[in-house]
Amino acid sequence: MSELTLTVMRLGFLAVLWLFVIVAVQVIRSDLFGTRVTQRAAVRRPDQAAAQRRPQQQQQGQAKPAGRGRQRRGAPTKLVVTEGSLTGTTVALQGQTITLGRAHDSTIVLDDDYASGRHARIYPDQNGQWIVEDLGSTNGTYLDRGRLTTPVPIPPGAPIRIGKTVIELRK
Amino acid sequence: MSSNNNTTVSPGGLPSRRNTELLMLVFAVVIPVFAYANVGLAKDGTLPAGMLGYGLGLGLLAGVTHLAVRRWAPYADPLMLPLATLLNGLGLVLIWRLDQEPTITTDALGGPMAPNQLMWSTVGVALFIGVLLLLKDHRLLQRYTYISMVVALVLLALPIFVGKEINGARIWVQIPGVGSLQPGEFAKIVIAIFFAGYLMVKRDALALASRRFMGLYLPRGRDLGPILVIWAISLLILIFETDLGTSLLFFGIFVVMLYVATERTSWIVFGLLLSASGAVFVASTNAHVGERVDNWLNPLDRAANDGVTETAQAMFSFGSGGLFGSGLGQGYSRLISGIAPKSDYILATVGEELGLAGLMAIIMLYALLIERGMRTALAARDPFGKLLAIGLAGVFAIQVFVVAGGVTALIPLTGMTMPFLAQGGSSVIANWALIALLLRISDTARRPAPAPAPSLDSEMTQVVRP
């Protein structure tokens, strides 16, 4: 057997061995997160489209460009679920409205008996400040300790509690 | 503002992932067959004659285990079985490869060992299936807490009375017609069951009734009892069986489980102090253990057989392997005397022929297997299952550490086998049983919770008409 073949086999075997290790780690990686993330790019509801059109009109009308899509300095970049069955889930904040509830078309579908179908939503206002609003839920949405009655800006790191689920906005 | 961030996140039931396991298993069978071909080409220039049969045999074993898991533990971890299969397969190839060396395969040394090892692996797989089939719920084991203790102590003490001494250690029991067996390999599983059951009941007393002193929680004197008893037993093993490995394994596993059960760092400190003082005491009084320590400290001294010590020979193997190794079948680990290269020093062959890269890959495989065990413990919902999974993963981890540490001269060498890799019937059988237990716990842990019974309150009120 030629020297070259043996060298190729020797290095090839090491490569295959490490490939197994890497594939095994990949299997674990997807196993670590108990949640399923499905892309829903194609479906867009009319009110969302309207919500996206609105700031453009506002920009035309106002002298000061509010720039809803633009990130402010120090603005939170992700939403993290810190308690509840979805613990560890993160959603990137990129200017879209995040709806929470048991309804299947919510951004974060809460599997929680204490959550309402359309429980709350989190959205950025014209200045890019993130606001949480309770959508008339049965058991209420809590920011820190207080129950929400009106849309309230979210201070960084403040826990928002919905039933057994707690979420936070983080940088 | 892109709309493709519009994602849905829902908890969803964990998929059973049996198909992932099947793919990984196929991969895990192909790698040893590749290794087999590699050895044959390097030694004779042809593909070895038995390659097809060997590949089919390993594939058959893997297939049967997979079907058993699919049938009896459908939600079990997808990675443990492929990892165990790969390690077992690589072990078979390495032993077969060392069988090709005439100088260490003489009749006096027991002849070729790969066929026997394949037979023991088959027995191990049978036991694996038996455990999955008969043990429907790991919590049944909790009933046998104190019986397990007695069984473990009997198994441990057996070699002292009916055992025979081989290579200075007294850990084998001769069974006529079958061969010699190491009861300690089975005792490690049984004792993990005992510790899990015992600590589940006692952990609150051990964790809470303590005083704080210099940042450490000092347990009450009477709570120190169990750890001292286990320490004394492990020292007795060390003295009467002169087996440092088993002794270290039993004490180590107790300290690990005690720490996990109580979350008190002080147990680790006590455990380290006790084991260190015990080891120093025995090493300075017992000749056999003393010799092992001496070999470890001065590997280049002349050994009794007028050569260098085995420790030094193993280091030479690692050194000549370098980063990428000499290639399978092209090393000189036969120069390590006796049958040691097939059993205790099989890692030296890995280090020489696959190099540092291969050795690290093998160690990664062990690490992944242990990680899956720990993950199972995290996911388990009952405290007994948590402690048992930690115990079994800990047994595996300590055994890998003790053997790999011994071969690479990090600690004195002890007579334990590398799980799945090294030659040894009892070891491979016991480890298949251990994997089966872990899979059973992980199946229970990952099984989706049953749907709640529909409550009458939520039913629509019906109008009852006469």
Image (cartoon, rainbow, N blue to C red):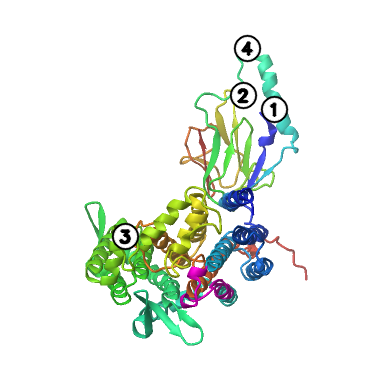
- Distance between the alpha carbons at the discs numbered 3 and 4: 81 Å
Mark 4, chain letter? A
Query: Mainly helix, strand or loop, the magenta region?
Result: helix
Q: Give the letter of the chain under mark 2.
A: A
Residue B133 locus on image (x, y percent): 60, 76
How crowded pointer 3 is (Cα within 10 Å; few <14, some 14-19, many 20+) is rated as many
- The furthest residue to the right: B466
Residue A165 position in % (x across, y down) = 54, 47
Q: Which residue is mark 3?
A: B296
Part of the protein shown in magenta: B102-122
* Residue B71 x %, y %: 66, 70
CA separation in Å, label 2 and label 1:
10 Å
Label 1 and label 4: CA atoms lie apart by: 19 Å
Residue named by callout 2: A68
The answer to whether mark 1 and mark 4 are in CB contact below 8 A is: no
Label 3 element class = helix
Please give the chain letter of the residue carrying mark 1: A
| CB contact under 8 Å: marks 2 and 1 | no
Residue B168 in view (yes/no): yes
Q: Residue placed farthest to the top in the image?
A: A63
